[in-house]
Image: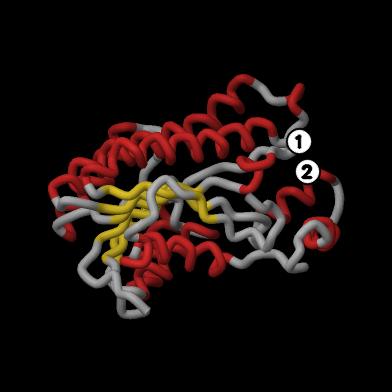
Amino acid sequence: MFTLEGKTAIVTGSGRGIGKGIAEMLASLGANMAITDIDEQISQKTADLIRSQGFKAISVPGDVTQLADVKRVVKKTAEEFGSVDILVNNAGIMGLQSFTDITLDEWNRMLQVHLTGSFLFSQETIPYMKQNNGGKIINIASNWGQRGEAGSVHYSAVKAGIIGFTKALAREMAPHGILVNAVAPGPIETDMIEEEARHLHTTADQIRSNLTSKIPLQRLGTVRDVAVSIAFLAGETGNFYCGQVLSPNGGEVMM
């Protein structure tokens, strides 16, 4: 498989879940990792885990919605490793509410974390990528952003926005050798299933069964299924991908 040796990657929201899996995957391929999460403890824990496996990682916690935090994360990463070559805009929050129950604060928070966070981190890392004559930006979308989901209008809307953001930014950055793409996972086995079960007043096993019944491959995705898609785009295998959306979803959405 290809190597990311000598490359430096920032993965937002990488203290746990899918972000953590992505960070571990990129580190295993040789990338210098900047772990950033709003939770300082889990950010440090993930960085420590990666270092214990013999790879390079630093913890730079921060809030993706705050410009000062974003600037600090990017600056410290560049100072520590000399460059920023790969950005994965993964940080996100989930929302499961009927449309009429969504408050303005909840709507705005969803926009801020997903879209504003991706906007800020991309703006701050692009100058470093231009200096290096290229780089990779990979945004995490969702199958719900492709098809919509009842009971999660705000989340579906921002994930669709991430896809539009990806395509427009890809066109603007391509002349600089900066390749912008997205990954839109389908149902993945994470703690979000437990959250959905609580919201719907059912069991996690019932949620899994309902989700699996709609997937042609008849299984939920794994964090690794998403991480290998990110690795594909981050490495030389992704050098002719521009403005594309990879969809590890087991066939739940077919584009």
Q: Nearer the viewer, residue 197 or 82?
A: 82
Q: Residue flagged by tag 2: what amino acid is it?
A: His
Q: Which image quadrant: the N terminus? A: bottom left
Residue drawn at 65 percent across, 43 percent down: 144
Q: Nearer the viewer, residue 197 or 142?
A: 142
Q: Which mark is residue 151?
A: 1
Q: Nearer the viewer, residue 25 or 247?
A: 247
Which residue has dot 2 on it?
199
Q: Position of residue 182 (x, y in %)?
A: 47, 49
Residue 239 picture quarter: bottom left
Residue 81 picture quarter: bottom left
* Label 1 packing within 10 angstroms: few (<14), some (14-19), many (20+): some
Distance from disc 1 to disc 2, alpha carbons, whole Å, reads 10 Å
Q: Is residue 77 visible?
A: no
Q: Position of residue 88 (x, y in %)?
A: 39, 52
Q: Position of residue 245 (x, y in %)?
A: 50, 50
> Which of the two discs, 1 and 2, sits closer to the camera?
1
As displayed, is residue 247 above or below residue 112? below
52 vs 216, left or right, is left
Q: Residue flagged by tag 1: what amino acid is it?
A: Gly
Q: Secondary structure at mark 2?
A: helix
